[in-house]
Amino acid sequence: MPDMNTLFAASMSVSIYTLVAGLLYLIMHAQKIVTANCVWLLSKLRADPRNVFVKMLADNAYLFTDSQISRINNEELFVNMSFGVD
């Protein structure tokens, strides 16, 4: 499988705020990105009509352990994400 940077460059990235609140999105791939200021979680989500990439809010970067991310990426763990707005 290509690395996340290649996938991200070839796909559509959207703001997390464009997702439909309450709708379930399958996380197909995930990767933590470490920057000088914080850690981000980049997620590939199954969304119709095409898959999208979402840069998760920094507060969500530690939702998954590295082991869980590896299992998601190897299709051993299936996780749905739902976005809600307060």
Image (spheres, rainbow, N blue to C red):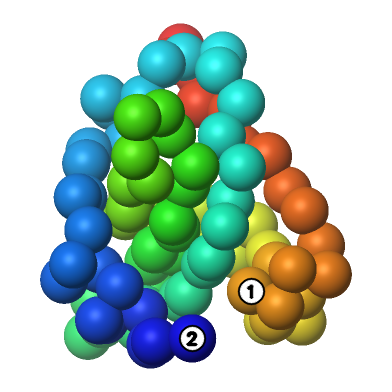
Q: Can residue 59 be seen in this view?
A: no
Residue contact at pointers 1 and 2, CB within 8 angstroms:
yes
Is residue 77 rendered to the left or right of residue 39?
A: right
- Helix, strand or loop under label 2: loop
Label 1 neighbour load within 10 Å: few <14, some 14-19, many 20+:
some
Q: Which SS class for mark 1? A: helix
Q: In the image, residue 58 lies at what x, y percent?
A: 38, 57
Depicted 79 relative to depicted 3: above or below: above
Q: Where is residue 27 in the image (x, y as percent from the top left)?
A: 58, 51
Q: Which of marks 1 and 2 is nearer the N terminus?
A: 2
Most foreground residue, 38 or 26: 26
The residue pinned by badge 2 equals: 1
Residue type (three-letter) at the residue carrying disc 1: Asn
> Is 78 placed left or right of 82 in the picture?
right
Numbered disc in front, either 1 or 2: 2
**1 with respect to 34 (left or right):** right
- The reply to whether residue 62 is in sight is yes
Q: Position of residue 8 (x, y in %)?
A: 25, 68
User: Nearest the camera: 2 or 65?
Assistant: 2
Residue at (50% x, 26% y) in the render: 83
Residue 80 point in image, percent of width and height: 68, 39
